[in-house]
Image (spheres, coloured by chain):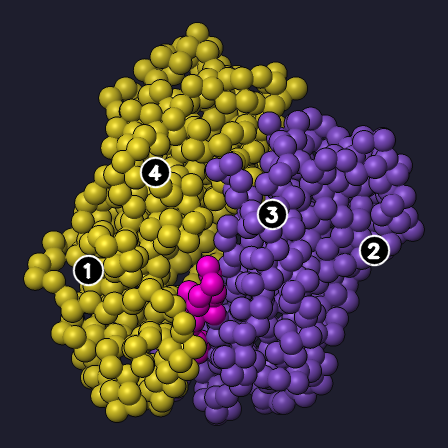
Amino acid sequence: MLDKNIINDVLLAAVSTGGDFAELFIEDTFRNSMSYIGGQLESTQSGRDFGIGIRIFKGTNAIYAYTNSFKKEDLILTALKAASAISGIKTDLHFNLTNHEIDNIHSYEILPETVDKKDKLDIMKLAYDSAYNYSDVISQVSIGLQDQNQKIAIANTDGLYAEDQRVYCRITINSVAEKNGEMQTGGQRPGCLAGFEFIKNLDIKELAEHASQTAVTMVNAGYVDSGTYPVIIDNGFGGVIFHEACGHGLEATSVAKGTSVFAGKLGQQVASELVTAVDDSTMKNEWGSSNIDDEGSKTQRKVLIENGILKGYMIDRLNGMRMNMPSNGASRRQSYRFAPTSRMSNTFIVNGNSTLDEIIQSTESGVYAKQMGGGSVNPATGDFNFAVLEGYMIKNGKIDKPVRGATLIGKGDKILHKIDMVADNLAMDQGMCGSKSGSIPANVGQPAIRVASITVGGR
Amino acid sequence: MNEYKALIEKLFEQAKDKGITEMEAYFREGESFSVNVFKGSIEDYKLSTSMGLGFRGFYHGKIGYSYTEKVAEDSIESLIRDVIGNASVNDNEDDDVIFEGAEEYQEVITYNEKLDEVTEKAKIDFAMEMDSKAYAHDSRVKVCQACVFSSGTSNTILMNNKGLYLSEKSNGASSYIVVTAADGEEMSTGVDFMVSNDFTRYNAVKMAHKAVEEATRMLHAKPVKTGEYKIVLDPVVSADMLSTIQSMFSARAVQKGVSMLKGKLNSKVASVCVTIVDDPFLKDGMGSASFDGEGVPTKFKKLIENGVLTTYLYNLKTAKKDGVTTTGNASRESYKSTIGIAPSNLYIQKGEKTFEEVIAYVGDGLYLTDLDGMHSGFNTISGDFSLGAKGFIIENGVLSRPVNQITVSGNYFDVMKKIEMVGSDLKFTFGSVGSPSIVIESLPVTGV
């Protein structure tokens, strides 16, 4: 992607003032995005992101610089400017850039940028028509189709040189139902680290109808009464609570700073013994996977919590040094514009022994959160707040009326102890996770779980 | 800059040969700097120089878009190919417009040369000082999570083959501090921020103290009893809510049927004390500009005047569809963006009462300083919200103990009608949306 001699010289310039490690991240990404609203194409955009990030370490202090320029003199200048933040003498580093061969386990068949845009439009039309015609109360549908072909190269003063390619495809379907002047929404957003064959193999009609079904159910729902209830959070996107309220606290970024509630608790009971949680960036073709992380380390399956005991964190190189622990291939970034840091990939709670039916039947009265929406967490205190996109009351062990406007409110570390049933229906769902190193594709996942009691905000 | 202008001219020439008729380029280059101090040492230090070129044009009567960050001659081919590819599938019936330019543009100062003279050392020292002053201010400060100072400069060119050539140089800076205070098991967070391209307005001690005090005053907060309360929303909280739901004013959202303000033009949508303006000429406004994303001159306008909805926000395409003139609100966040609609500086106009007078007027109620879950518990289409809240009890016209672990719910469109008073303390968010303190007649609060 860039001449090795140039890379070599830029790395040397980066450590010219005493830095003890330097790294280059070279990115060349092609993107396409289309949006289809109200029965016609709203916008299409195609483009190329291109740039180079330079990172320098001095001890555990880090400097980051990036540029879009691919000219040698500009790159050297950027490296020198970044290096000038360190005042020292040139480090005597010797390295030979050696190719680190990568076995691409996330294969693709059809490169999305080679697909005729008319074929993409036809798929969006099918999604639109299926969602719009689902019911008379559907007032608006918007469809998005995004694909990306990211090529990266990473080189560092350890002599590492590695290249990787990540091909992503995703379709988003959002339905709006309107009744008596009120609007409610429903959505589906499957995505994959794979080629366009992923989109072609989806049952678009069923996904679209599912999105509309949620909106229609919710526009006919009454408001939930706020209070404290046992809450059953169903599989798939339900995992967003674990992701936001616990997962971020297991990233070395917050553990190294000591700001995480999980810092210093390895080997301790941090969750109910029914809970085993994993972050696995090696899952074939999954949304959050990659062959190597964004500092060139091979990705891994990491057990975070096993039977309620804290087993490990997601660790990047820099925070690993701060914590005196090795990296486990968890360093990620949105693009060359961001310094990488420890992030989640595919993070999920593993299957338990109950069935969803058993959990519902054993719940006298409570809330069933069939589909979760987004949420937010205060990282310092662990306070979280999540919207229930599609919710129902549970009465006498049966699913009762749908309820709207429910939000789940609590503290991440406390909730983990209150999980008293775990089902066997693990599923993944796709999200974009925003944090320090930008917005990256991440899978959330879990089987259905029951939290013994949680505050439900409503009306 | 001339180098890039020449490249764009070459792009236009080759595109014309390929059958693209009207076309426009949007080029931006910039530099940025950011430092984050943690416990007395530099945790993040970031520099950048970057550029990108966005291109759009008509092919067989339809518009297509493309962009590249490799701004060089060998990118011309793909820019043209993508515009043609995207235009070829464009079945949108509404007419896109490439603007020929206007006679006059009001001058807006978006560049402060003094900021570019501030050294990196001065910026680092500023962040260092915030960090140390925060720890020194109160022994209950557990950790100062972030002390950030960022600045940047950019040059933008918007040009088309219909005679438009506009350029803008701007710079900006911002800073924020996040502090966690602890007392035993009790923990709370406080934040302060500043946005301005005038470095002399930044005061590290003041910001550190404000964040610390905001954190410590919330320690030992407790819920209140469930019930209906008269509510005072802090300016930044009110501005955050308005910012979250601002797309209700977009003519695009109205035309697509996803704005609750659809069909409400010239009718009462808020109480009489509410006037909401969009002011692109606001001094020091983050959203200030003399031209919008399509090169149209911006203008000052009232969106809601004394409770009555007076206009939506338009760009050329949506204005043409509604048979009105554009309000100069075409948005273009970057060269990667297609044209959308966004306000410039959007704010609720201030009233006359000071914050103390507002609290005295309320007598008994709740003053909310934090709403959590704005992006989950707030449906930006329906206006329904159910949010975690923190704040203070208002008792006998003054603030008393801190409150947390409560939720407040309602519907934003109802809230707008239930605003009884607006204060004189207009403040802007980290972005370009502002509000004074507002008094809401009553909202249901869930506590204990």
Q: In the rendered image, which quarter is residue A120 located in?
A: bottom right
Residue B49 can be seen, yes or no? no
Horizontal side of residue A443 vs B297, given as left or right: right
Kindly report the distance in space between the C-alpha atoms of the residues bearing marks 1 and 3: 38 Å
Which residue is painted at 44% across and 68% down in the image? A41
A248 and A156: which is toward the camera = A248
Q: Label 1 amino acid?
A: Val
Q: Label 3 amino acid?
A: Ala
Q: Which mark is residue A425?
A: 2
Q: Are marks 4 and 2 in contact (CB under 8 Å)?
A: no
Rendered yellow, the chain in question is B
Kindly report the distance in space between the C-alpha atoms of the residues bearing marks 4 and 2: 47 Å
Q: What residue would you read off at disc 1?
A: B296
**Residue A363 is a magenta residue:** no
Between label 4 and label 2, give the one nearer the viewer.
4
- To the question of a shared chain for discs 4 and 2, the answer is no
**Residue A50 is a magenta residue:** yes
A142 and A90: which is toward the camera = A142
The magenta span reads A34-51
Between label 2 and label 3, give the one nearer the viewer.
3
- To the question of a shared chain for discs 1 and 4, the answer is yes
Please state the chain letter of the residue tagged with numbered disc 3 in the rendered image: A
Residue B166 can be seen, yes or no? yes
Q: What residue would you read off at disc 4?
A: B264
